[in-house]
Image (tube, rainbow, N blue to C red):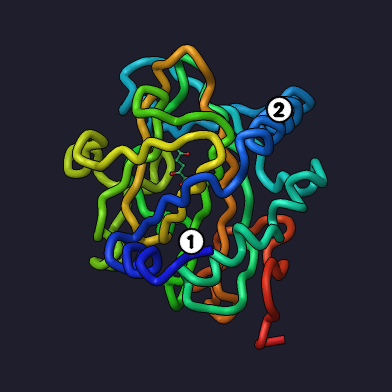
Amino acid sequence: MADSSMVRFYQDNGYALVKGLLTKAEARAYREECHALLGRLSQTEATWGSARALAGRATELRHCHDVQFHSAAFTRLLVDPRFTDVAAALTGSENVQLHHTKIFVKPAEKGSPFPMHQDSAHFPHTRHTVGAAIFHFDDAPEEKGCVRVVPGSHKGGPLAHIEEGGWHLPLSEWPLEAAIPIEAEAGDVLFLGYLTVHGSGVNRAAEARTTLLIQFRDPEDRPADDVHRSRGQGMMLRGVDPGR
Ligand SMILES: O=C(O)CCC(=O)C(=O)O
């Protein structure tokens, strides 16, 4: 559950790391579930074009979207009150609605980076309540390419992005190294507002980095543009949709 100091920290900084939201055993089980799912799929590569310039070498990123349509274990996590109660407190709404889900696995020693960006560039909304919860299923120290954030960057509102190679900010103006690494352990969940500038580095470690990202919003926050559709979008994860 998010207390008032966590909510204040999120409002000031645009992110909050919740330690141990899942147990180590749950994280381990979800890690296996993610790797088993990716093993069942034929096409999983998702490295952004702009990430190649950032890494300076060939890297790989394995992903799967809409994971609750592949395994019921992820469906259960979507409505887990340990997650939805924090999401509600941070967005300031009793009601939490699904936007989309995705697994990312950064393979050992060659896991792709993400250039700095705001998620708002990918799916703008009218009230800016959209947030991401990044579930860590194994440890994510800096050398594994943990998520990096620019605290307080959400306060400047939406920034102009470059579309080519995945919506991102100019690499020279927004170097990854200038952002704060948010190192996490298995079971930790990083909550991130969609205006918070973030990215992540190359996984240089000997173990893969495994995460699930759940993007959520207040149901009264409508998309500003019809640019991002996904299966399951609009599903209620907590409370009701007052507009329906
Ligand atoms: O998982 C990461 O390292 C970053 C993911 C990210 O920035 C995104 O999906 O927008």
Q: Secondary structure at mark 2?
A: helix
Label 1 near label 2: C-beta < 8 Å? Answer: no
Residue at 67% of width from left, 34% of height from top?
25
**How far across and down, in percent of the image, does residue 131 sit?**
48, 61
**How far across and down, in percent of the image, does residue 80 sit?**
69, 58
State the residue in front, 172 or 221. 221
State the residue in front, 105 or 19. 19
Left or right side of 154 for 38: right
Number of marks:
2
**How far across and down, in percent of the image, does residue 228 sit?**
58, 58
Residue at 36% of width from left, 15% of height from top?
57
Residue behind mark 2:
32
Q: Earlier in the sequence, mark 2 or mark 1?
A: 2
State the residue in front, 35 or 113. 35
Indicate the amino acid at tag 1: Gly
Which quadrant of the figure contains the C terminus? Answer: bottom right
Indicate the amino acid at tag 2: Glu
Residue neighbourhood size for the residue with mark 1, other residues' Cα within 10 Å, grouped as few (<14), some (14–19), many (≥20): many
Residue at 40% of width from left, 34% of height from top?
146
Residue behind mark 1:
131
Q: Quadrant of residue 180?
A: top left
Residue neighbourhood size for the residue with mark 2, other residues' Cα within 10 Å, grouped as few (<14), some (14–19), many (≥20): some
- Discs 2/1, front: 2
Task: Indicate whether 142 appears above or below 130.
Answer: above
Rounded to the nearest whole Å, what is the CA distance between mark 2 and mark 1?
26 Å
Q: Secondary structure at mark 1?
A: strand
**How far across and down, in percent of the image, does residue 115 sit?**
34, 38
Residue situated furthest bottom in the rendering: 243
State the residue in front, 69 or 52. 69
Which quadrant of the figure contains the N terminus? Answer: bottom right
Residue at 24% of width from left, 60% of height from top?
152
